[in-house]
Image (tube, rainbow, N blue to C red):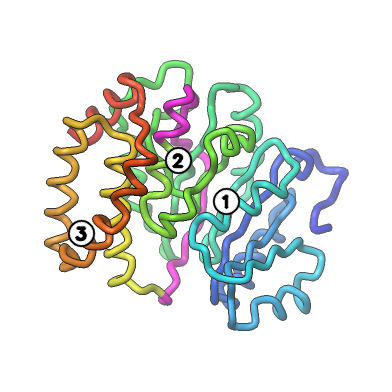
Amino acid sequence: MNARWEDPLPQRITVVVLTHNRADELRRTLERMLALPLQPLIMVVDNGSADGTGELMKSRFPYIRLITLPRNIGAAARNAGVRLADTDYVAFCDDDTWWAGGSLERAVALLDAHPDLAVLCARVLVGPEEREDPTCAGMAASPLPSEGLPGPALLGFMAGASVFRRSAFLEAGGYEPKLFIGGEETLLTLDLAARGWRLAYIPQMTVHHYPSLQRDSGSRRKYLARNALWVCWMRLPLSVALVQTWRILGAARRDGVLGAGLAAALRGLPWVMRRRKVVPPAVAHQYRILHG
């Protein structure tokens, strides 16, 4: 195992690292995680890599648990790690992110103290210059009611910088496999909130992000447009869904993926409508506060 069991942290939290064809980035992330003063349990989910990731794990990190999937299934690969974890809490990071010292200990303490919290989202510092991710400012200024929470209330999170109560993740069903990538955080957030769970931003927790250069932005934009439409119609009330659809299509037009994104969304419409389950009015109200 990769943990020192005399420490309290490993018995409470597992870090699930998702990777796909980024062996060099994964090596760096694991080295950083293993250098933490208190080492959590670490589990790597290999999302169908073909770049020697498996060989790297066997040669450099044989004591870290590796889950090898036969193909890339996108964000839903994280579900496999959560199912196999046997700790109360699960922290996520990608192969180009890692947790700063003290952050996971803080997460355990906060989740212990706030049983209605399902998700904590950390502050993200980007690159060697440690620029704060712009999303953090928006989370810090959240207008949602935060009474009883240790930080600003959220209706959303960043997957690679989040800590989950494992039972809440499983209760809400985890990440939807059909989305592959994009929109999965929004759908899971709405499903958690519909069940009464809360989310909070904790700027005292920190994740470092060195963005990988291996990104297919065109494909991502198409998936983002398609999935935004799908999630909108799976969970939002009709009036809100109509407004958001107009906005999503406008963004897709600006990104040059209107045709591809809309066509992909329409192909999945029967599935979307079968999965339609509108969130409670209180959750829809929070959504309106944030999105208008």
**Residue 201 magenta-drawn?**
yes
Task: Tell me the amino acid under the disc marked 2.
Answer: Leu
Q: Label 3, label 1: how many angstroms apart (C-alpha)?
A: 31 Å
Q: Earlier in the sequence, mark 2 or mark 1?
A: 1
Task: Tell me the amino acid under the disc marked 1.
Answer: Phe
Residue 201, picture quadrant: top left
Q: Is residue 216 above or below residue 40?
A: below
Other residues around mark 3 within 10 Å, as few (<14) / some (14–19) / many (≥20): many
Residue 251, picture quadrant: bottom left
Q: Earlier in the sequence, mark 3 or mark 2?
A: 2
Query: Viewed as shown, does residue 106 lie left or right of 4?
Result: left
Which residue in the structure is indicated by mark 1?
92
206 or 146: nearer the viewer: 146
Q: Secondary structure at mark 3?
A: helix
Residue 75 place in picture, x, y as percent: 49, 57
State if disc 1 and disc 2 touch (CB < 8 Å).
no
Which residue in the structure is indicated by mark 3?
262
